[in-house]
Amino acid sequence: MSWPDHRSVFYALGTFLSGLAALMLLPALADFVVADSNWTAFVASATVTGGVGGATILAFRTKHKPTIGRREGFLLITLSWVVSCIFAALPFMLSRERLGFADAFFESTSGLTTTGSTILADLEAEFARVRAAGYALNNQERIDGIVGVAVPVFDPDGNVLASVGMHGPLPRVTMKTCERHVPRLQQAAARIARVWFA
């Protein structure tokens, strides 16, 4: 039995990491556009990930075309999952969340495998508060000086399909103004649901 061609596997893994680094620049750009300081965490993560990916490509390049057979494929897929979760943890560690490695690794694994689990207790508490109140408030969480409110649009089974909201700049729109508009927004959401599922 022959061993997998490890040079081809690590070359492909380096290419994968370089692609992951490029993808990290998308949330960095989005955060930069809305003036969220977390963009630096994504740029730093992309730099580290791209650096490791590029170094891996250079270290394992060969004169012949990389070959990925069955054995190499199994090894590459396994390594890709583990390594992508490790590098995807970097933004959690470098952002304002400042998670430790174990928590950041858990969050990135949860996100990449779409399990929906989280260790961010504040997030779970906020979800519970929003469900109980029936609406969500945004008090300058993404953009300084912008506040807003949103209410859910439910399907006949009670699942949330969309939301109806309003937002505006301080001081023209305050949190009290937002809360005053909740009944109207809930009426609009109910009307949309009735039309949608008529």
Image (spheres, rainbow, N blue to C red):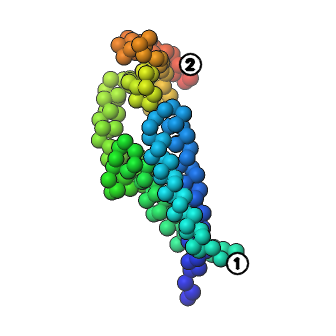
Mark 2 or mark 1, earlier in chain: 1
* Residue at 57% from the left image edge and 73% from the top image edge: 59
Q: Quadrant of the N terminus?
A: bottom right
Q: Residue 12, image x and y in percent? A: 60, 67
Camera-side residue: 156 or 32? 32
* Residue at 51% from the left image edge and 31% from the top image edge: 34
Q: CA distance from mark 2 to mark 1?
A: 61 Å
Question: In the image, what residue type sits under mark 1?
Answer: His
Say what secondary structure mark 2 lies in: helix
Q: Quadrant of the C terminus?
A: top right
Around disc 2, counting alpha carbons within 10 Å, would you say few (fewer than 14), some (14 to 19), or many (20 or more)? few
Q: Residue 26, image x and y in percent? A: 56, 44
Q: Which residue is mark 2?
A: 195
Q: Residue 30, image x and y in percent? A: 54, 37
Q: Is residue 8 visible?
A: yes
Question: In the image, what residue type sits under mark 2?
Answer: Val
Q: Is residue 102 above or below residue 11?
A: above
* Residue at 52% from the left image edge and 37% from the top image edge: 32
Camera-side residue: 197 or 191? 191
- Which residue sits furthest bottom? 1
Horizontal side of residue 10 vs 150, given as left or right: right
Q: Residue 191, image x and y in percent? A: 51, 16
Say what secondary structure mark 1 lies in: loop
Q: Is residue 183 visible?
A: no
Camera-side residue: 76 or 44? 44
Q: Nearer the viewer, mark 2 or mark 1?
A: 1
Around disc 1, counting alpha carbons within 10 Å, would you say few (fewer than 14), some (14 to 19), or many (20 or more)? few
Q: Which residue is mark 1?
A: 64
* Residue at 31% from the left image edge and 26% from the top image edge: 132
Q: Is residue 73 above or below residue 164?
A: below
Q: Is residue 198 above or below residue 74?
A: above
